[in-house]
Amino acid sequence: MNLHEYQGKSILASYGVRVQRGHVANNAEEAVEKAKQLTAETGTGWHVIKAQIHAGGRGKGGGVKLAKNLDQVREIAGQIIGMDLITPQTPPTGKRVHKVLVAEDVYYPGESETKEFYMSVLLNRGTGRNMIMYSTEGGMDIEEVAEHTPDKIFTEEIDPAYGLQGFQARRIAFNLGLSGEAFKEMTKFVDALYKAYIGSDSSMFEINPVLKTSDNKIMAVDAKVTLDDNALYRHADLAEMRDITEERPIEVEAKEAGLNYVDLDGTVGCMVNGAGLAMATMDLIKYAGFEPANFLDVGGTADAKRVETAFRIILKDPNVKAILINIFGGIVRCDRVAQGVVDAYKNMGDAIKVPIIVRLQGTNAEVAKELIDNSGMPILSAVQFQEAADQVKAALS
């Protein structure tokens, strides 16, 4: 589950991480009031207005701007709220901005220069350990840094038996070229950041930039946070942070129905049980020369109602030209799935206007094939993978 910047910062702050302070506003007038409140709290005279969407690169799309007075706060907030913000991480049509973060200006003058760093905490799937990835090149796309100057990217892996050690936090501060008070501040920052990551059961914390201020404070100016969905039952307060306006409606509906669904750009709808078989089915579709329209795992307990719900969700995508159902009957019996397909076809009537190919293998597969073949409906059945691929190709040719 992705979070907005202001939500990620609230988690960080709760673990003692210094963050750029701010307040959320839903319209221009509220932004002015939040700016006044922030001035009273921090003494800041300038304010940074930040679009709150689940995507990076907001500044490149005009979603992050500096306001030097309250009139500019009102004007900029009014421009950003309601805009369709296009960034390298949004769909081509952009994402609609519903709120902004009115944040303090932390790039104030001082005795020393400010410096931006990059830092993230995530799982290294190759080693099965959490790692801290960091770089002196903050404020830039980490992909560009990795491509052009890989020597400026460092990693620190954490042994799960011991957790983050003090010497590791100090090594990070040293590799970032810090000394004196800034060095001490960075070690505290790293320790608190890792505790926030572990304590919130997150999949990723990305802070870009981590800022060394002119008075040697270390703070998170941005926060991109992804929580582990499988651990949300332990964090009811964090689960409430979910913003469904940032998610595709069709994926929200699928999740509420207990289906694992990801919308894609192809023309062949997939209905499969089991993530591994779903991936293989998508490969099958590509091997046949087409692109999958979705990833849809109906789970191991697919019944008639769930199959019909899956049908309705798949058919909401106007790009779907055929549907491939690929079920392995292990826990679930194939004849029950077949009956669900037939019942769904009867109940939905004219709503199904695309060819359907059904491949059922496993428990009661022969009975299931007979049900499909004797249904009197234009449903094509297959036994082998290649046969299913050939039928998809024939249906779309």
Image (cartoon, rainbow, N blue to C red):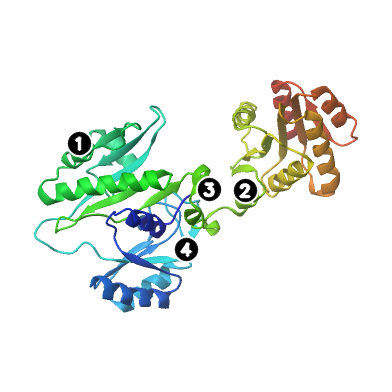
Q: Earlier in the sequence, mark 3 or mark 1?
A: 1
- Position in image of residue 313 (x %, y %): 69, 47
- For residue 97, the mark is 4
- Position in image of residue 72 (x %, y %): 32, 75
Amino acid type at image mark 1: Phe
Judge from the rendering whether residue 75 lies leftward or rightward of residue 291; answer left or right. left
Amino acid type at image mark 4: Val
Residue visible at 16% across and 48% down in the picture: 184
For mark 1, give the secondary structure: helix
Report the residue marked by disc 3.
233
Cα distance, mark 1 to mark 2? Answer: 43 Å
- For residue 255, the mark is 2
Asked which quadrant contains residue 133, the reply is top left
Judge from the rendering whether residue 293 lies leftward or rightward of residue 333; answer left or right. left
Q: Earlier in the sequence, mark 1 or mark 4?
A: 4
Residue visible at 87% across and 30% down in the picture: 371
Judge from the rendering whether residue 130 lies leftward or rightward of residue 302; answer left or right. left
| Viewer-closest of 162 and 96 | 162
Cα distance, mark 1 to mark 4? Answer: 42 Å
